[in-house]
Image (cartoon, rainbow, N blue to C red):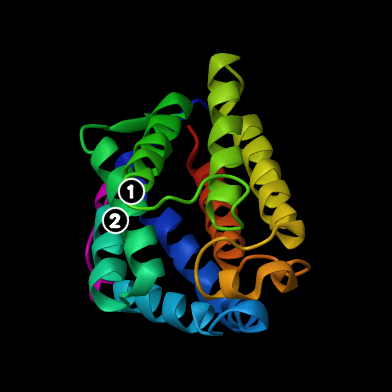
């Protein structure tokens, strides 16, 4: 089990959509503690619009990521629309020439998305944002790639790193967004974006395992 077929990536995208839909209330509840309280609502809107528009169309994994990113960027707006839109479009572009996607390929796709995201936001690990989830997840994949680990094992480790990163935001002080106005009072609550990122990476990882050849 060393790779999956890019053309069969629709099931991965569906898993990501379901994860957001099932956790929309939870995400908004978390966001409401230190933010606007609309993170789950907005994410659900964007992912559901993507699902509705492309439900009857064949999409490869990379094509779907680009379509999803474009939908989020154009339809939900705000910081999260731009952030997730940039991330997914970058990932999709990096996989545009791939027939089979290996661990190294997936790592490169996420790294490209992270790189493009870093061009538009200043947040870095420790700033209580989704970067605290994404950065350790990517680092875990890079280490697994270097060690030539089994794809499934690498995904399990990636999910654990993403969860640890997301959990760490609970003890961090927000430096960006509305929560940053609360200063020390933002400590004790996880960042909603970091939680949605964890959910998406977990859904993506689990769905990929089902496609590994």
> Is the residue 89 above or below the residue 182 in the image?
above
Of 180 and 24, the residue lying toward us: 180
The image quadrant of residue 160 is: top right
Side of 40 relative to 92 (left or right): right
The image quadrant of residue 118 is: top left
| Residue wearing tag 2 | 64
Side of 150 relative to 73 (left or right): right
Of 158 and 113, the residue lying toward us: 113
| Crowd band around label 1 with a 10 angstrom C-alpha radius: few (<14), some (14–19), many (20+) | many
**Disc 2 element:** helix
Of 85 and 35, the residue lying toward us: 35
> Is the residue 209 above or below the residue 10 in the image?
above
Spot occupied by residue 49 in the image (x, y as percentages of width and height): 31, 78
Res. 62 in view? yes
Spot occupied by residue 176 in the image (x, y as percentages of width and height): 51, 63
Q: Give me the residue at 74% from left, 62% from top.
A: 170
Res. 95 in view? no
Q: Give me the residue at 50% from left, 84% from top.
A: 38
Image mark count: 2
Q: Give me the residue at 55% from left, 15% from top.
A: 146
**Disc 1 element:** helix
Spot occupied by residue 39 in the image (x, y as percentages of width and height): 51, 77
| Residue wearing tag 1 | 61
Q: Which residues are magenta?
A: 53-64
> Is the residue 89 above or below the residue 177 in the image?
above
- Evaluate if marks 1 and 2 touch, with contact meaning CB atoms under 8 Å apart: yes
């Amino acid at each position: 089990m060393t790779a999956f077929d890019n053309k069969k990536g629709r099931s991965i995208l569906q898993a990501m959509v379901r994860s957001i839909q099932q956790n929309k209330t939870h995400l908004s509840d978390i966001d409401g503690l230190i933010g606007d309280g609309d993170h789950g609502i907005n994410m659900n809107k964007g992912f559901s619009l993507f699902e509705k528009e492309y439900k009857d169309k064949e999409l490869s994994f990379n094509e779907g990521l680009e379509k999803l990113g474009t939908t989020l960027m154009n339809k939900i707006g705000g910081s999260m629309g731009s952030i997730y839109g940039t991330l997914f479009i970058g990932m999709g572009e990096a996989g545009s020439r791939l027939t089979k996607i290996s661990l190294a390929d997936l790592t490169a796709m996420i790294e490209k998305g992270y790189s493009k995201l870093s061009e538009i936001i200043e947040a870095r690990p420790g700033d209580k944002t989704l970067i605290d989830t994404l950065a350790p997840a990517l680092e875990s994949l890079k280490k697994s790639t270097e060690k030539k680990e089994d794809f499934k094992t690498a995904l399990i480790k990636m999910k654990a790193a993403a969860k640890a990163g997301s959990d760490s935001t609970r003890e961090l002080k927000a430096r960006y967004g509305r929560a940053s106005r609360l200063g020390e009072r933002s400590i004790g609550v996880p960042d909603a974006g970091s939680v949605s990122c964890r959910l998406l990476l977990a859904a993506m990882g689990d769905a990929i395992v089902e496609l590994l050849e």
